[in-house]
Amino acid sequence: MQPCLIQIGRLAPQLEAALASEFEIYPLWKENDAPAFIAAHAGRINGIVTSARAGADRALIEALPSLKLIANFGVGYDTVDVAAARERGVVVSNTPDVLNDCVADTAFALILDVTRSISAADRFVRRGEWKRGASFPLAVRVTGKNLGIVGLGRIGQAIARRSAGFGMPVRYHTRRPMAGMPWAHEPSLLELARWADILVVACAGGQGTRHLVSKEVLDALGPKGYIVNISRGTVIDEAAMVEALAARRIAGAGIDVFENEPHVPDALLELDNVVLLPHIGSGTHETRAAMGELVLANIRSFYSDGRLLTPVQY
Ligand code: NAP
């Protein structure tokens, strides 16, 4: 089969250049009338390259009768309709493992920032308050705090390993306990939230985890508890989180992902006990290059011998 792909949204410039030099690929985002383009070329297109932001929905998958492959830039594939892909026998690849360290580093950056008020202290200096003689309020010690992790997959484990350097006891919540882990499994998310000083969300996104972190979970975390989310915005009930933060029913939040990106609720912009990032968990030169290489390697492997290096198991 000769590769003939469409690229749904923008990707890193190096990856776009490599894709264009190796394959027949059409950047759909450049088309003024994407549906007309699809209708005109549908029979030939046998691959999609996409990302978490652009995804691939059922309507697109069903509009492409020759489609065989969806290559996703990113480990999370919640915006790819895998049910529609499975029905059609379309395989899906993602980019696991190569981003674990950077996403776990981001989780720790948020943990340290929100508990020690690093960004808030930076704003305090820039506003000239230090110069005018004001004192910055005391923050909260990180070392030794209880770290609860929701989701102990590849990224959750990398976060848990980092906790050793901060003397933090770790417990985790997943649907099934993981064999061979040194950390305690907590079958109840509410109990994990009650125990945790800091609750880090690192599970998969999608319908199965939508609003898993509910108002009740946030209340169990309590007024001294911090929430950190590097997973997907949909996992937390964002409206409930905003309310809990504004009312100080939780102490603070470090958030890399939002329910309706790039929209960030206005109320969060007003709060000094919240650290807001624009979905940059894996956003380093090194990791984005490694993710791009893995996208290319999957496409090459699929079109040369029909196998994916990192298939999504659905
Ligand atoms: P993974 O290895 O597949 O791990 C997913 C974890 O989620 C597993 O431990 C799984 O455990 C748990 N999980 C799934 N459904 C659950 C539920 N209903 N309740 C509790 N736990 C549940 O995935 P990963 O590679 O670590 O990546 C995790 C997620 O991070 C991705 O899906 C992606 O959305 C996000 N991510 C974000 C960024 C960023 O830039 N912020 C970058 C990369 C990835 P069980 O199946 O046993 O429940």
Image: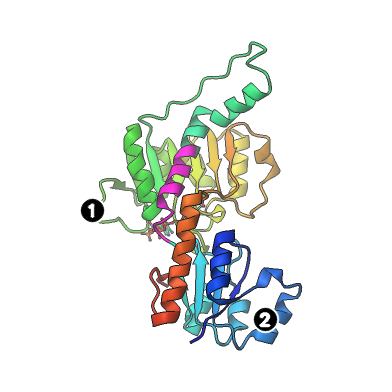
For mark 1, give the secondary structure.
loop
CB of mark 1 near ligand 1 (< 8 Å): no
Taking the magenta stretch, the answer to whether it contains residue 100 is yes
The answer to whether residue 118 is above or below residue 151 is above
Residue 302: x and y, percent? 43, 78
Pointer 1 residue: 180
Taking the magenta stretch, the answer to whether it contains residue 16 is no
Q: Residue at x 47, y 33 (%)?
A: 112
Any part of residue 32 in sight: yes
The amino acid type found where label 1 is placed reads Gly
> 256 and 172: which one is in front?
256
Q: For the stretch drawn in magenta, what is the main secondary structure?
A: helix
The answer to whether residue 237 is above or below residue 82 is above
Magenta segment range? 96-109
Q: Residue at x 62, y 48 (%)?
A: 239
> 242 and 14: which one is in front?
14
Pointer 2 residue: 38
Answer with left or right where residue 258 lies relative to residue 290.
Answer: right
Q: Which image quarter: residue 146?
A: top left
Residue 66: x and y, percent? 55, 87
Q: Residues within 10 Å of mark 1 (few under 14, many from 20)?
A: few
The answer for how far apart the CA atoms under marks 1 and 2 are is: 48 Å
Residue 58: x and y, percent? 59, 76
